[in-house]
Amino acid sequence: MSPSIDQPIFTYIYFASILLIRYIIIALGTHIILWKFLIKNLLKYKLVQTPLPKGQIKREINYSIQTILIFAIGGVTNFYISQKNLGLYYKNIADYGWVYWWFSIFMMIFN
């Protein structure tokens, strides 16, 4: 199922699901590598002296889910703007050149 402009709730769920899947893959992979393999070596040298506070993992997951939902709102907004032709999207950088592209990024950040 691809996003449709006629069904906003499904479009939002679509974007949120993609972000959630990407997050799970990256976060779980990082967790396994760092905490399951590297932490044992760090504990030998007492570089990590205390375990995580109780509830810290749940708090981190909660904050991550909130962030995913916020970014999904941005994705849905950009999708609708592009579908309704309400914004100007440059699909070919060569139309304006790389200097203009970098300048527009700079202006979006600092404007």
Image (cartoon, helix red, strand yellow):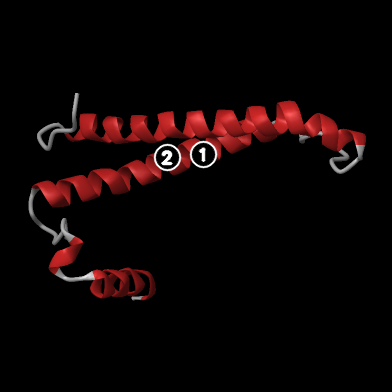
Q: Position of residue 91 (x, y in %)?
A: 16, 56
Q: Quadrant of the N terminus?
A: top left
Residue 107 falls left or right of residue 21: left
Residue 77 in view here: yes
| Amino acid type at mark 1 | Ser
Q: Residue at position x 12%, y 37% from top? A: 5
Q: Position of residue 17 (x, y in %)?
A: 35, 29
Residue 54 in view here: no
- The image quarter containing residue 101 is bottom left
* Secondary-structure class at tag 1: helix
Q: Are marks 1 and 2 in contact (CB under 8 Å)?
A: yes
Residue 26 falls left or right of residue 111: right
Q: Residue at position x 35%, y 73% from top? A: 106
Q: Residue furthest right?
A: 45
Task: Identify the residue position indicated by label 1 in the image.
Answer: 64
Task: Identify the residue position indicated by label 2 in the image.
Answer: 68
Q: Residue furthest top?
A: 1
| Amino acid type at mark 2 | Ile
| Disc 1 to disc 2, C-alpha distance | 6 Å
Q: Nearer the viewer, residue 62 or 85?
A: 85
Q: Residues within 10 Å of mark 1 (few under 14, many from 20)?
A: some
Residue 96 falls left or right of residue 49: left
Q: Position of residue 28 (x, y in %)?
A: 57, 28
Q: Nearer the viewer, residue 66 or 24?
A: 24
Q: Nearer the viewer, residue 59 or 49?
A: 49
Residue 50 falls left or right of residue 79: right
Q: Position of residue 102 (x, y in %)?
A: 32, 71
* Secondary-structure class at tag 2: helix
Q: For the image shown, how many numbered marks are present on the structure?
A: 2
- The image quarter containing residue 96 is bottom left
